[in-house]
Amino acid sequence: MRKNGHTRGICERRGRWGWAFVVPSLVFFGLFSIYPVLNALYLSFFQKHLLSTAPPKFIGFGNYLYLFHSPTFWNSLRATAIFTGGAFSLLVGLSLILAVFITSRRKLQRFLQLAFFSPAVVSTVVAAAIWLLIFDPRGIANQLVNALAGTPGVDHNWLAAPAMLQLSTILVYVWKYVGYFTIIFITGIGSIPRSLFEAARVDGASVWQTFWKITFPLLKPTTLLVSVMAMIQCLRTFSTQYFFSQAGSPRSPIDVITLNVYHTAIRNFQIGRASALSLILFAIMLLLSWLQFRLARSEEVSYL
């Protein structure tokens, strides 16, 4: 009995210390993550001018009905879909290819990882400023395309034509984040036992067969993680589109939902409408993440 009481006392003390370490994180998460979402949900049912001291006016689903009948909202939804579809597919595909390429090298692996990861450290605003110079009519982008296509002196309107502007924002995002997701894939490949690759080599499997029969199936949990993270990251894009529009590019082709939220709340002072728009984006993120988990089915793989 004394031993059981002593053990119970130790467990209780450990439990109290555990709560002491966990509670600050829970409070921080609640204040800066849960509360903003709940506050946005509350404000989305009110008509509220950001600079007005008048109390908000309850309008129910009026903000949502306004958005669903607004051409600007549907244009933002279309711009977000185009950007997310292009950037997401390139990020996942290129990062997987780069990870397989880097892990297959016997030399310069560390250098290649550092080289591809370094843009992720750069601020998004700085990255956008660098690419503004590249996409300038006298910049490297025009010179490179003209050299390859044999069209000297042609301006391809990277920052003006709608399609080229959308492509420009996608390229900036892929350049910045592809190295980050490449490192995650490299980590996933490193967790696969080397004995499986050695057995495949002994059995005479080609590089292509090894990838499709061993590497790719066993990377399922990593691919799911990268897919969800990349999808959310693309849906949250803001800085590149904002910086390009401030530099003089037309806003409509790149008016993603986050940029629309900014203009609705900060420029037009409609905080209730902006809250409703934010919640719609939040719901889209949840839905797409849930669909990816459903399509992936099982996240566990076996090496046996």
Image (tube, grey):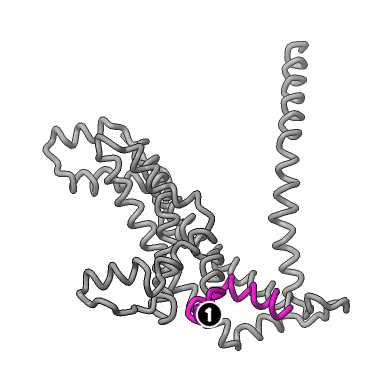
The vertical placement of 125 against 192, above or below, is: below
Q: Position of residue 66 (x, y in %)?
A: 66, 86
- State the image coordinates of residue 270 (x, y, percent, origin top left): 73, 79
Q: Which residues are magenta?
A: 245-269
The N terminus lies in quadrant? top right
Q: Quadrant of the C terminus?
A: top left
Q: Nearer the viewer, residue 291 or 243?
A: 243
Horizontal relation, residue 92 to residue 290: left or right: left
Q: Quadrant of residue 205?
A: top left
Q: Foreground residue, 107 or 155?
A: 155
| 224 in relation to 210, above or below | below
Identify which residue is drawn at 53% across, 74% down.
Answer: 247
Which residue is outermost to the top? 2
Q: What residue lies at 26% left-to-right and 35% top-to-bottom?
A: 107
| Picture quadrant of residue 201 | top left
Residue at 37%, 68% (x, y): give it: 139
Q: Residue 164, can we see it?
A: yes
Query: The residue tagged with tag 1: helix, strand or loop?
Result: loop
User: Is residue 21 magenta-colored?
Assistant: no
Q: Quadrant of residue 267?
A: bottom right
Frontmost residue, 2 versus 28 = 28
Q: Main secondary structure of the magenta part?
A: helix
Q: Residues within 10 Å of mark 1 (few under 14, many from 20)?
A: some
Q: Is residue 212 left or right of residue 226?
A: left
Tell me residue 208's x, y (percent): 18, 48
| Residue 290 in view | no
* Residue bearing mark 1: 251
Q: Specify the amino acid type for callout 1.
A: Arg
| Direction from residue 82 to residue 99 in the image, left or right | left
Q: Nearer the viewer, residue 260 or 245?
A: 245
Q: Report the number of discs.
A: 1
Q: Position of residue 294 (x, y in %)?
A: 45, 58
